[in-house]
Image (cartoon, rainbow, N blue to C red):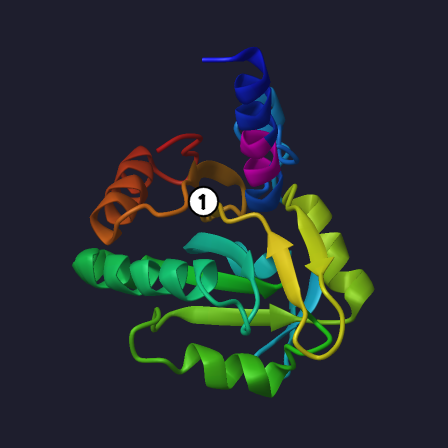
């Protein structure tokens, strides 16, 4: 295999990592002292038009995922998996919620999020959060999320990280649930964290 071909493969791998946020979110999958910094204050609005901040995460296990309603693949796929995982949790599902934070506040209004999350295949215990651009950017920074607008005009896309962040009932980071995890794998991550209690720092 030629050196030139290997270089091309390396470049393509880095480009893919950047799109999914792997290259940007070095802290997310890094040492414990870095992952502990995932999460922080945010000031947004939920799908019912009510103010929402980091206190929304307290008292329940929260799967925090950043995306947008016009997302063609990663977002509906992840929300579908979370919806199925919620069912697999059985009675424990009452202490589990999904928090979907928009990376496209210009189009994702509260009513738009409410309509989107009404999909019966998506989690029943779900909050959709949006806000002004500066507010959603604040949340993205807190969670080490990569966001990049792609294209122009009304049909633009938004490249973004595709990890799901599991937060414990104290609102603190527990672990990363990787993109494309099956509902069974997601449920297993959540159950493993629940077994450790509210101080869980891994799953």
Expressed as whole percent of the image width and height from the top left, the position of residue 202 reads 40, 30
Expressed as whole percent of the image width and height from the top left, the position of residue 132 reads 78, 71
Expressed as whole percent of the image width and height from the top left, the position of residue 180 reads 35, 48
| Front one among 93 and 182 | 182
| Magenta span includes 109 | no
Q: Residue placed at 56% from the left, 33% from the top?
A: 12
| Front one among 52 and 183 | 183
Q: Which residue is mark 1?
A: 168
Q: Residue placed at 59% from the left, 41% from the top?
A: 21
Q: Residue placed at 52% from the left, 39% from the top?
A: 173
Q: Is residue 44 left or right of residue 112?
A: right
| Front one among 155 and 96 | 155
Q: Residue placed at 63% from the left, 77% from the top?
A: 108
State which region is magenta.
12-17
| Front one among 144 and 169 | 144
Q: Quadrant of residue 42?
A: bottom right
Expressed as whole percent of the image width and height from the top left, the position of residue 38 reads 61, 38
Q: Quadrant of the C terminus?
A: top left
Q: Is residue 63 above or below residue 196?
A: below
Q: Could you tell me which secondary element the residue under label 1 belongs to? A: loop
């Amino acid at each position: 295999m030629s050196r030139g071909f290997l270089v091309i493969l390396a470049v393509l791998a880095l480009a893919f990592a950047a799109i999914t946020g792997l290259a940007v979110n070095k802290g997310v999958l890094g040492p414990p002292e870095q992952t502990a910094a995932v999460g922080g204050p945010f000031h947004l609005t939920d799908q019912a038009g009510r103010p929402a901040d980091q206190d929304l995460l307290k008292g329940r296990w929260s799967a925090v995922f950043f995306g947008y309603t016009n997302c063609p693949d990663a977002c509906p796929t992840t929300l579908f998996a979370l919806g199925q995982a919620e069912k697999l949790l059985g009675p424990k599902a009452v202490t589990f919620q999904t928090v979907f934070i928009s990376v496209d506040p210009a189009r994702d209004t509260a009513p738009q999020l409410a309509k989107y999350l009404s999909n019966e295949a998506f989690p029943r215990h779900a909050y959709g959060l949006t806000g002004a651009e500066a507010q959603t950017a604040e949340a993205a920074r807190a969670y080490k999320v990569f966001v990049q607008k792609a294209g122009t005009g009304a049909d633009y896309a938004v490249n973004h990280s595709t990890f799901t962040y599991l937060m414990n009932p104290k609102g603190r980071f527990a672990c990363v649930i990787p993109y494309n995890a099956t509902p069974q794998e997601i449920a297993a991550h959540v159950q493993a964290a629940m077994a450790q209690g509210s101080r869980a720092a891994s799953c």
